[in-house]
Amino acid sequence: MGRSKKNNSTVKTWRQIHDGFIVPRNTDIHEVLNAIFYFLKIGCQWRLIPYDFPPWETVYTYFSQWIKDGTWKKIHE
């Protein structure tokens, strides 16, 4: 299953998240964000996120952390 094309809201959200990171990462945060959007839109289980995204454990860890530290809420303000 292929991913949908990026839209302006995805790019805007990506910039908000990207600007908050100082430490270099091995994981492409943009792809993590795309995977989270996929998860929320489709409503699948974390383990069923397509393999062309980062590993589900990585995506879940970022999402969980962003929920706990308020990053996810800040994105939607």
Image (spheres, helix red, strand yellow):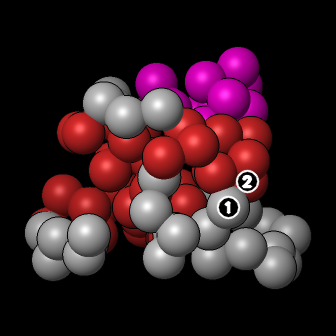
Name the residue nearer the viewer: 49 or 10. 49
Magenta portion: prevailing SS class: helix
Tell me if mark 2 has few (under 14), some (14-19) or many (20+) residues whose alpha carbon lies within 10 angstroms of its own: few
The residue that mark 2 highlights is 58
Q: Is residue 65 magenta?
A: yes
User: Does 62 sit above or below residue 18?
Assistant: above
Q: Is residue 16 visible?
A: no
Q: Residue at x 73, y 74 (%)?
A: 27
Q: Residues within 10 Å of mark 1 (few under 14, many from 20)?
A: some
As drawn, 40 above or below 54: above
Find out whether the residues at labels 2 and 1 contact each other: C-beta distance under 8 Å: yes
Residue 27: mark: none
Task: Name which residue lies at 73% across and 53% down.
Answer: 58
Provide residue 21's location: percent of width, then percent of height: 71, 62
In the image, what residue occupies the spot 74% across and 41% down?
61
What's the residue type where badge 2 is placed? Thr
The number of numbered discs placed on residues in the rendered structure image is 2
Does 24 appear above or below 74?
below
Hey, which residue is sitting farthest right in the picture?
23
The part of the image, by quadrant, that contains residue 50 is bottom left
- What is the quadrant of the N terminus in the image? bottom left
Question: In the image, residue 8 lies at what x, y percent?
Answer: 14, 68
Residue 18 spot, x, y in % from top left: 56, 66
Q: Residue at x 18, y 58 (%)?
A: 9
Q: Which residues are magenta?
A: 62-73
Please identify the quarter of the rendering in which residue 76 is found. Answer: top left
**Residue at the disc numbered 1:** 55
What whole-number distance in Å separates the C-alpha atoms at marks 2 and 1?
A: 5 Å
Q: Nearer the viewer, mark 2 or mark 1?
A: 1
Specify whether residue 69 is painted magenta: yes
Give how far across and how far down residue 69 sits, in percent: 71, 25
Q: Is residue 50 visible?
A: yes
